[in-house]
Structures are given as C-alpha cells and as structure tokens.
Amino acid sequence: MKRDTVRTIVLVIGVLILLAIVGLGSAVWLFMRSFDIGKADAASATQQFDRIRSRFAGIAPVLEIRDEDAIVARRPPAHHTGRRLTTLHVVAWDPDDEDFARVDLPFWLLRLKSGPIEIAANHTRIRSGELGITVEELERYGPTLVLDHRGEDGERILVWTE
C-alpha cells in the first residue's frame, strides 16, 4: 500500500514537472515568435511603413498623439463590427540607432489584461507608453489602423489590428 502511494506521488510530481517544462517552452516560443527587432535605414523603414499604411488608404487612425498623450481621434462605430480581432501589430523605427521593431501580439493574450493597452514606445515620447484604449474599445472598431505617429526626431510607430 505504501509503495503504491510513493509511486503515485512520484508520477504526479513527474507530470507536473513535464507540464511546467512544456508551459515554459510554449511561453518562450510565443515570445520569440511575437517580436522581431532588427536594423533598417531610412529608405527601407519608409518603404515598410508605406506598404503597411497603404492597406489603410483613406482611413484615419483611431488615436493621435498630441502633447505626448494619446487621444481618441476617431469615435468607434455605434455597433460592434462583428469581426473578432486576432492580432495587434506594432511597428516602430528609431532613426538614431536605425532600430526597426515589429511586435505581433495575439488578442487572446491582450484580453487577459484589464485596463488600457500599454506599449513601451520610448522613441515616440508617449507618456508612460499608454495608448489609453482598452481591448474592448478596440474590438468595437474591428480591424483598423490604431495609430500612425511620426515624432519630431523622425521616429515612427504604426499600430493596427487584424
């Protein structure tokens, strides 16, 4: 009887360790898949921003940055669009270091967070990085251009949803 109890405890501990390893591996995979940071000169960064922005021709961004604060520039539709968002995309470029960053965050992950969405956008000088909009508010817009900002020093950030 005692021997069966010990085996069961060892088996349970082994399964828990295996689940922890799989969970950690999955988290690392998701993190590595979501972020891409590299270098880009002004011409290639502009080309990438223009390519993305062309998908939203004639569409004003939801947010604008004024005096270092993100403000709502376009009101949400009265009714939910019905399309469930899957990804929040962020592309940022710093001309000083020629750093080009792309982040693709799954919306299921963002839905776990309450309060406004925060993006560390140091180069755009957004105070505290808060976009000041919640996931629920973004979902009312459906897939759209959220932010297209060019800073005084040439830095740029583009945020959109799909």
Image (cartoon, rainbow, N blue to C red):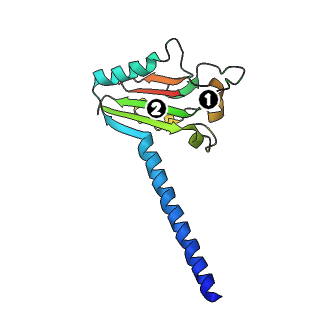
Residue under the point 41% across and 40% down: 35
Q: Which is nearer the N-term, disc 1 or disc 2? A: 2
Type of the residue with mark 1: Leu
**Label 1–label 2 contact, CB within 8 A:** no
- Position of 16 compared to 35: left or right? right
Identify the mark at residue 150; answer none if there is no mark.
none
Residue 119 visible at all: no
Q: Mark 2: which secondary structure?
A: strand
* Quarter where residue 43 is shown: top left
Instruction: List the single residue furthest toward the right.
Output: 79
Q: Position of residue 152 (x, y in %)?
A: 38, 22
Q: Position of residue 59 (x, y in %)?
A: 54, 15
* Residue linked to disc 2: 90
Instruction: List the single residue furthest toward the bottom.
Output: 2
Could you tell me which quadrant the N terminus lies in?
A: bottom right
Residue under the point 59% across and 41% down: 108
Identify the mark at residue 138; answer none if there is no mark.
1
Pick the residue in front: 38 or 1: 1
